[in-house]
Image (spheres, coloured by chain):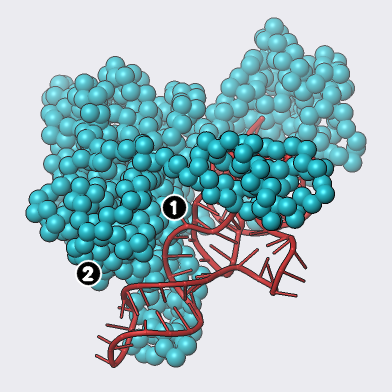
Amino acid sequence: MSKKYILEMFPYPSGNIHMGHVRNYVIGDICARYHKLKGDEVVHPMGWDAFGLPAENAAMQFKTHPKDWTLSNIKNMKAQLKKLDLDLDWEKELATCKEDYYQYQQELFIDLYNAGLAYKKDALVNWDPEDQTVLANEQVIDGKGWRTGATVEQKVLSQWFFKITNYAEELLTGLDELTLWPEKVKTMQRNWIGKSIGAEIKFDVIGKNESLNIFTTRPDTIYGATFIAISVNHNLVSKSLSSSEIENIKNLFDQVSDEKEKIGYLLDIECKHPLLDKKLPVYVANFVLDNYGEGAIFGCPAHDERDYEFAIKYDLPIIKVIQCEDNQLPFTEDGLVINSPLLNGLSKSDAILKITEHFESEKIGKRSINYKLRDWGVSRQRYWGCPIPVIYYEDGSYRVLEKSELPVLLPYDVNLSGKGNALLNHNNWRKITCSKTNKIAYRETDTLDTFVDSSWYYIRFLDNKLKKPFDNQRVDEYLPVDKYIGGIEHAILHLLYSRFFMKALRDIYKLNINEPFKQLFTQGMITHKTYKTVNNEWVMPKEVIYENGKLLRVKTKESIEEGPSEKMSKSKKNVIEPDEILENYGLDATRVFMISDSPPDRELEWTDEGIQSSKNLVRRIEKYFTIKSTNLKKDTEKMIEKFIFNIEKNILNFSLNKCVADIYTLFNYLEKEKVFLNDSEISKKILICLYPIAPKMSLKISNKLFNTNIMSEWPGINNELLEESSINLPIQIHGKLITTIKTEKGYNEKDILKSIYQIEKVKNKILERKVIKVINVQDKIINIITN
RNA sequence: GCGCCAGUGGCGGAAUGGUAGACGCGCUGGUCUUAGGAACCAGUGGGCAACCGUGGGGGUUCGAGUCCCUCCUGGCGCACCA
C-alpha cells in the first residue's frame, strides 16, 4: 500500500463556490477515489485560505466583523462542498484565520528569524494616503488606489522580509527535477528567478574617494562604454544632490508620458573608465532599475538598444566594439570584438572570459551572478492576517518573541473605520509590558502576507491538531504532495513561496523533503458566452431565452446580443451557479460535464447542450442496468477489459475527457450488440470503474443489483484478454493507404503478400511496375514500394 | 521586444513516426410518441469521380498531424532585468 497525497488548492472563503472550484475539486476527487479503490492510503484534505483583505472590505461595507464574515462564509461554502459529495477527509480541515493554525505559523516565523531567514529593512511601499494603508502592486491602478482613487505615494517603511534569495539557485535548479510539472509553469518560475551570469565592475569617481559597482552581462563591451547611468535611488545620488533636487528629478521622471521614453539628469561627477584613460559622464536615468543588480549601468550605445536611444538623445559618443556595419547599430548580436586592446578578434564568450579574468587580477571587478528574484516582503499593514510575533521598545529596538510567549492573538474588538491599520489604533492590544524586561513595549502591528499562510498549509494538513507546527516523521512520510491541482494563476507566487518554505523548513527541521509538490496539474478555466442588452448591460445566461430565432431577456423581452465566450466572471455576469446546476442536473451529470468537453488543463466552455448530454449519459447508464438479460457475447469481456485498461490509464494521465469517451464507447457497444449483463462480476467491474467519475449513480445501481457496497477494489486487468489475435492490416503502396485486410497476428510475410497481390485494388496500382521493396512492420502495416 | 505554448470537420476534441478525424455536440433523414431539452435507428471532412485533405512553404523518412528548418496566425507569461 502506498500513500497518495492528493490536494486541490484550498479556496478563499469568499462566500460561495463557483464553477471553477467545482471543476478543480471534481478532478481531484476522481483521482482520490481511484487511488482509494487501488488500495492506496489516500490523503485528501480541504481547508480555507481564510485571511485577507476582502474580509476587511466586506466588514466595512456590510458593517460586520472580518471574523464573523469569514466564518459564516466558510460554513456556507462547506455546505456547498458537501453537496458535491467530495471524498474529502474533513477531519483534517483547517482555516488559516484560526488560532490553531496561525499560532504555529508564528512559531515558524520565529524559526525563520532564528535561522537568519527573516529580517527587517526599510523598503518602498505603495501608500494610499486616504486609507492610510499600504497597497499591493495589483491594487494600484494607473497610480491611484483601487478603492479610494487617491494618488498613491511611494513611502519608505520598515518591513519584514523572508530571505528567499538565499534559495534562488536551488529554486532554479530544483525545477529540473520536477518532471511532473507543466513546462509552462517551470518556464515562468525560471524567468521570475531570472538568473544572469556576468561581471561586477568597479568604476572610480574622479576626484572623490568614491566608487560605484555595476553589474553587466556584457563585460566584453566594456571598451565601448561612453557613459554611466544610475537609478534615482542610488546612494551616489543622495551624496551628490540635495533632497529637493532629488524630488525635482523624481517629478521630472514622473511626468514622462511614454513609459519607455528615456530621460536623464547629468550629475556633476565623472567616472574613470576602468581600462582607458577616459572620463565617463554620470547620469541619473529613469530607465535604470534600482532593485536590480547594483542600480547602475555602464552605457555601451553601440551594442545596447536602450543605451543607444539614450546616447542619441543626449548626443553621447557611440563606439563600436563588436564587428558590424554602421547601419546595424545598435548591434546586439554576437560578433568579433574590435577596438578593444585586450580583446580584439575574440568571440563574445571568449572575450567575456578573458576580460573577467583581467578584472579579477586587477581587482577592478569579478565574475558575478545576479537574480531578478527579490527577497519576499511579508509585512502587510492590515488587521485580518497573522500577527507577526515581535515587540518594540520605546527606544526603537525590537525583540522577536519566544515560542513560549505565543500565541499572539488577533483582538476581536477593533475599529475598522477604513482609516489605517486597526491594530495600530488598538492601544489596549498594542501596548504591553515585556515579560522579560518589564519594560513598556508595543506589538508589531503589521500582519503577514496571506501567501505565508498558504506556503505551508499542505504540511499542517497532515496533523492539524498537533500542538506544534508539524511532526517531522509524518512530513517525511507523507510529503511531497503527489498530485497538486489548481489554477495556473498561482504559477509563480504561491508555488514559488511554497517551494521556498519547504526548503527552509527542511534546513531548519532537518527534513528529507526538497520539494512540496511532486506533480502539479493546472486545470483550465470555465468559460461561457456573454450576453448584453443594447444598452450594454450584462445579462446572466439564465435570464436569456431563445425565441423565434432571437435572443431575448426573459423578463423584459429586450433583445440580447451574444458575445464571445469568456472566463466566467461576476462582472460580466456570465456565471452559472453550482447550486442550481446540481439541483437541475444532479451531481453525477455535473461531474461528468466538468471533464467531458475538453482536456482538464484546457478551458472548458459551458454549454446547455454539454450539461444536458452529460445528464443523458447518466440516465442512459442507469437505464442500461435496469434491463435484465442474459446475452453475454464472446467479445464482451475483451471490450470490458479494454475499458478498464483505458479508464485507468486516462485517470492517471489526467486525460479525463477521454474517460468519458471510454464510457460512451463501452455503452455504445453494449447497447448496439444488445449485450445485457447478467454476469454480476462483469457488472461490478464496470460499476467500480464508473465510481470515481459518477459515484452517486454507481452506488445507486450497485445497491440495487447487489444490495451491498461493492466499491472496494479496482479490477485487475487480464492482459491475455487485451491481446487481439486478429487485426485489420493496412496495406500501403508508396505510403498511401490502398486497403486493409483482416488477418491473424503473426502472419507469414511471404504468404500474406501472395494474397495481397491478388487484391484487385493492389493489382491495379502495381500494374506493370516492379515491386522493389516491401516494408512489413509485423502486425502493424505493410508498405509496398514499386519502381 | 523577449520567452513559452498552440493551430486537425460546422464546433469541442482523438491519434507510442504506421488506417487522420476516436468520443461528444450540432446537423440531416427516419421510428415511437398528445407532447418533449426524452428514447431508438441510419448518416455526417471535401469532391460526381479519379482523388484531395491536419495554418503556408521547404526538408528527413518506405511512411509525417506527429521529427527538423522557415514563415504566418492566435493565446499566455515577462516586460527598460543592463
The residue lying toward the viewer, choosing from A355 and A335, is A335
Residue farthest to the top? A361
Q: Which residue shows up at 29% across the image and 19% down it?
A: A511
Q: Chain of mark 2?
A: A
SS at mark 1 in the image: loop
Residue A269 placement: quadrant? top right
Q: Which residue shows up at 67% across the image and 10% down it?
A: A360
Q: Is residue A452 left or right of residue A429?
A: right
Q: Position of residue A125 (x, y in %)?
A: 44, 43
Closer to the eye: label 2 or 1? 1
Placement of B9 over or under A773, stated as above or below: below
Q: In which quadrant is the C terminus of chain A drawn?
A: top right
* Residue behind mark 1: A599
Indicate the amino acid at tag 2: Glu
Q: Which residue shows up at 47% across the image and 39% down it?
A: A182
Asked whether residue A322 appears in the rendered view, the answer is yes
Badge 2 vs badge 1, beta-carbon distance below 8 Å? no
Hue used for the chain lettered B: red
Q: Chain of mark 1?
A: A
Indicate the amino acid at tag 1: Pro
Residues marked 2 and 1, same chain? yes
Q: Position of residue A234 (x, y in %)?
A: 58, 32
Placement of A116 over or under A10, stated as above or below: above
Q: Which chain is cyan?
A: A
Residue A578 placement: quadrant? bottom left
The residue lying toward the viewer, choosing from A435 and B61, is B61
Badge 1: residue crowd in 10 Å (few <14, some 14–19, many ≥20): some
* Residue behind mark 2: A583
